[in-house]
Image (spheres, rainbow, N blue to C red):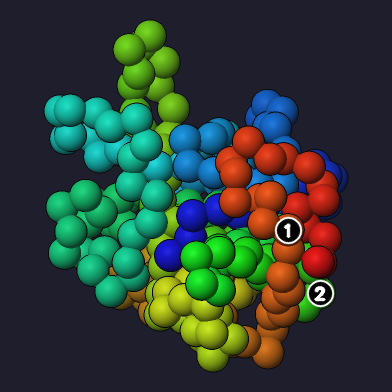
Amino acid sequence: MCGRYSFFSKDDILEDRFQAHFNIPIQRHYNAAPTQKLPVILNDNPKEIVPGQWGLIPRWLKDKPGRGLINARAETLTEKPSFRNAVKKHRCLVLADSFFEWTRQASTKIPYRILLKNERPFAFAGIWEFYKNKQGVTFPTFSIITTPANNMISELHDRMPAILEPKYEQLWIDDSTELEAALETLKPLPANQMKMYQVSPQMNSVRYESEDIIKPT
């Protein structure tokens, strides 16, 4: 499961890290949530960082939802009608600095921030489809792929987002990559490359966007 993450690195850091450039400015979010426009690199233009709406809307869906499908399980990508076309033809990188997961103490949800030990930005494996809204504007929508949790994340949840190791990022979005080889990259990132700590419960509200969100409590 991945229902909230952060994206706040500066343009030059991201452009150097992913060897791609921003085509337009994209708003930063310490508390990124579904339906927001967030940075992605699409397979059809791997040198550009573009805004995509979090929540994939399949092209064939007649009754268009407002939220879309925010996550896609790695194990069933080729089986689900909503995802099987996208995983073959529309793979993307979803750029992030960290993500959030929760545990419960009685009725209270306790949030944790999860990031790389080196605190560098990284990419979730994603899939995307174009969506045309009522105003006639077309833009990409995306889902973040999830895998079984590693040993650290399993303390909080049994699923985690598929964080791609840097050596697999270009393979994932390369159109010449065989589907089987692409799917092989969707594995839980080892726990020894990650760290986590508790953060303020204020981030439970999607309206709360302060930098304080990423500070330990």
Q: Quick one: quadrant of the C terminus?
A: bottom right
Judged by depth in the image, the label closer to the viewer, 1 or 2, is 1
User: Residue 103 or 5: which is nearer the viewer?
Assistant: 103
- Which numbered disc, 1 or 2, marks the residue that appears first in the sequence? 2
Residue 17: quadrant of the picture: bottom right
Q: Residues within 10 Å of mark 1 (few under 14, many from 20)?
A: some
- Position of 186 with respect to 62 (left or right) is right
- Position of 163 with respect to 208 (left or right) is left
The residue tagged 1 is: 200
Q: Is residue 168 above or below residue 130?
A: below
Q: Find residue 118 and name its label.
A: 2
The residue shown at (55%, 64%) is 108
x then y, percent, for residue 6: 67, 52
The residue shown at (81%, 74%) is 118
Q: Quick one: quadrant of the N terminus?
A: bottom left
The residue shown at (69%, 50%) is 202
x then y, percent, for residue 123: 60, 61
SS assignment at label 2: loop
Q: Residue furthest top?
A: 135
x then y, percent, for residue 30: 72, 47
The residue shown at (60%, 44%) is 205
Residue type, numbered disc 1: Ser
x then y, percent, for residue 12: 84, 45
